Amino acid sequence: MARIGIMTCSNAVQELGCSSAVCLADMRKRKGAFADYPKDEPVDLVGMISCPGCPTLVGEDKLIARIRALTEFRVDVIHFSNCVTELCPFKNKYKSALEAAYPKVRIRLGTHQDAITEEEFRARVKKLFGQERKTMVDVILGRD
């Protein structure tokens, strides 16, 4: 039985409301990055955690500390969700840091099967992030 952890993009989860439903569905159906897991063997989702955010000078250290919450529960593999894999410019740096810190844990890029190209996905997400939205300042200044 594979013991799986998933790391999501904190921006996609917190700013865009991603629920990881497609990642989890494809894990259950053995699609996308989960297609290599034998269908006749169970998979155990140990947990999910969001990336600590875009890095500063301590980005890798924050990530290693955060991922510890999964490694303490004996994960075999940590999947970087598609939002991390397709959007994060630091994914390879983070992958290397985790492989060095947790050599017994495999790191896989990706989760669900994409219905659109990476370029289209990136363009759509960029548009979502670029939408004008109201903030607390607007409420305080009466612009709501």
Image: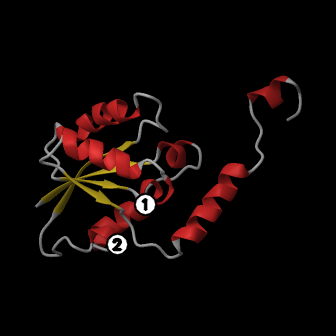
For the N terminus, which image quadrant? bottom left
Q: CA distance from mark 2 to mark 1?
A: 10 Å
Q: Is residue 116 left or right of residue 51?
A: right
Q: Is residue 95 left or right of residue 138?
A: left
Q: Are marks 2 and 1 in contact (CB under 8 Å)?
A: yes
Residue type at mark 2: give it. Gly
Helix, strand or loop for disc 1:
helix
Image quarter of residue 43? bottom left
Residue type at mark 1: give it. Asn
- Residue at far top of view: 140
**Numbered label tally:** 2
6 or 57, nearer to the observer: 57
Give the crowd class for mark 1: few <14, some 14-19, many >=20 residues within 10 Å: many
Query: Height in image: 90 above or below 63?
Result: below
Residue displayed at 78% across by 46% down? 132
Residue 55: % across, % down: 46, 35
Residue 39: % across, % down: 18, 75
Residue displayed at 66% across by 50% down? 129
Image quarter of residue 136? top right
Q: Is residue 139 left or right of residue 111?
A: right
47 or 80, nearer to the observer: 80
Residue displayed at 77% across by 38% down? 134
What residue sits right under mark 1 in the picture?
82
> Which label is found at residue 106?
none
What residue sits right under mark 2 in the picture?
32
